[in-house]
Amino acid sequence: MKKLLVIAFVILSANVFSQTNILCTDSIANQVLLGNYNPLNYNASVILNRPDTIFKGINARVNPDSLKSYVFKFATFYNRNTASDTVSQTRGIGAARRWVYSKFQQYSATCQNRLIPAYLQFTLNVCGVTQHRDVIAVLPGLDTTDKSIVIIEGHIDSRCTNNCDTSSKAEGVEDNASGAALVMELARVMCKYSYNNTIVFIATTGEEQGLYGAYAFSNYAKQKGIKIKAVLNNDVIGGVICGYTSSAPSCPGYGNIDSTQVRIFSLGSFNSAHKGLARFTKLEYKENLMVTATVPMLISIMTPQDRTGRGGDHEPFNTNGYTAIRFTAANEDGDANVTDTAYKDRQHTSRDSLGTFKKNSSSSSLDSLFVNFPYLSRNAIINGNAAGMLAIGPMQPDINLTSPAPGSLRIQITKQTQYHQYRIGLRSLTNDWDSVYTMTGTLVDTITNLPSGTYDVSVMSDDTNNIESLPSTEYTAKVTGIGELTAPAKTVELLQNKPNPFDLATCISVNVTKNIEYHTAYISIKDMKGVEIQRLPIKLKTGIDEVLFDHGYHPTGTYIYTLVIDGQSIESKRMMFAN
């Protein structure tokens, strides 16, 4: 049944291209999105734009009680289905979006009216209703030289078992009042500060039926030529309890609690701008906040774009070529397989509520809450810190990479050469950097004494405030060990999978140095008994070619993967599955 749900989702998603009449309801907000405005008109009386002022301020001012009040308010709208009531003042998606809009207005009043609320309106038939609205708040940047915007988003709509049910209870507390509340709290907190780039806070609609609200904004940006530096999507971001089921890769078993880890899902592997954004987010948290955090957070950079068979509002931005990632809680309560009669988790049902009521009591007070607000607060701070540093950071560089001698890598900055310092990120077998080096006062540097192996390398500009840019294009280089002979370059080379060992999914890459003629090529994956468990077709073109092996929750251990071209086994390697 789950596969049928995925097929239905793909069919629904195809409808996004029939969206019409996409417009921003506020002309001023629209001009700011386009970068056509005078920044002086939006300057604060006191400009607070130092990095430490911003990230320390976000860390101090994000409030678990504020987040709790928003989530509790979202629950009062009873059903926030995309096609639910738009007339009532107390129930339905209309009341919910008007309330979010009013809160953006309130925040703006405390920030010298610098935050501009608006709706992004679009026409599309969703469950019989044709007009829909995202709620946005636009914070103009200080500098229009770079017109790129930074987006923080979370969907506002909810659902119960029937995806078009507009009358049953659908409080959607974890999915996704938690994410919408995070967006609202960051709008409240971050509008106190000033950034070079414009920041846009978005509460999208239509996510549950096919990511429609995110597609509307992404398509609007593409049509209007709006430049987007990065998108931080937040969905199912406040719960800490593992359900009976969860969409892989996820939690270890029912009742497990994890309040110190957040997962980042993103598209691609080698030279993925999305993985680069995830690594940037983790680095900024580690260097700005982790050292003083009362409860340090683990940021896990996941291999796939999203959980198995699932999707989120970062994907429409990926589709249109924008850099976007998804933040999701470490533990989820349910895999959303609501058609399974044995399904008893909360996600995508009326049970996605605030919590459980006290037993044997006439009181209506809650005994426990399903969203952990200190945890949600910590995730909001991670988002805010990344968005803030993105919006004040320098320009991306580019490099030339060589290995001039055994055990060495030579990096030369070829683009954005005006900075005094650069950060070099090296990775080998994981999605994260193994090491981050600093080069100061030079545009050429050589890293020496490296173990032999294949390295993926990217570089960040580092400005006078010690804030990094997004990582550059990622390049790969093979380093030989001292005393080793340099092997002749191969036309086709099977690379080590990454990450390795891996949890649930891993990326298998092939390096092709020049065009080859062939009919069929695939990766054969076998267990140690020689039983083939999967074949992954792969297209071989010059450069790095990749396929994703989604292993699922199957036996742990060692597996053999082989590149097969036109029936001939070219090369094999081992990989370790250690779920």
Image (cartoon, rainbow, N blue to C red):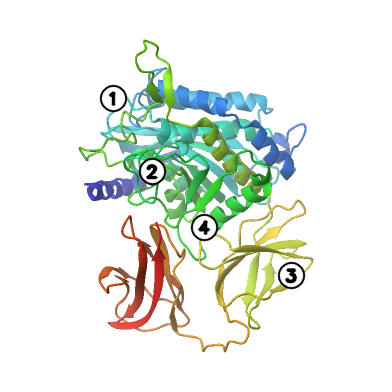
Q: Label 2's element? A: loop
Please name the residue shown 38% across and 43% down the image.
211
Disc 4, disc 3: CB below 8 Å?
no
Q: Label 3's element? A: loop
Amino acid type shown at disc 3: Leu
For the residue carrying disc 4, how many other residues have a C-alpha within 10 Å: few (<14), some (14-19), or many (20+)? Answer: many
Residue denoted by label 4: 275
Q: Label 4's element? A: helix
Callout in the foreground (4, 3): 4
Measuring from the top left, give residue 542's x and y in whole percent. 45, 77
For the residue carrying disc 3, how many other residues have a C-alpha within 10 Å: few (<14), some (14-19), or many (20+)? Answer: some
Residue denoted by label 1: 168
Amino acid type shown at disc 4: Lys
Residue denoted by label 3: 443
Please name whichever residue, 550 or 553, is drawn nearer the observer in this view of the structure.
Answer: 553
Please name the residue shown 35% across and 73% down the image.
560
Give the Cα distance between marks 4 and 3: 25 Å
Give the Cα distance between marks 1 and 4: 39 Å
Amino acid type shown at disc 1: Ser
Amino acid type shown at disc 2: Leu
In-image side of 410 versus 129 (left or right):
right
Callout in the foreground (4, 2): 4
Q: Which of disc 3 and disc 4 is earlier in sequence? A: 4
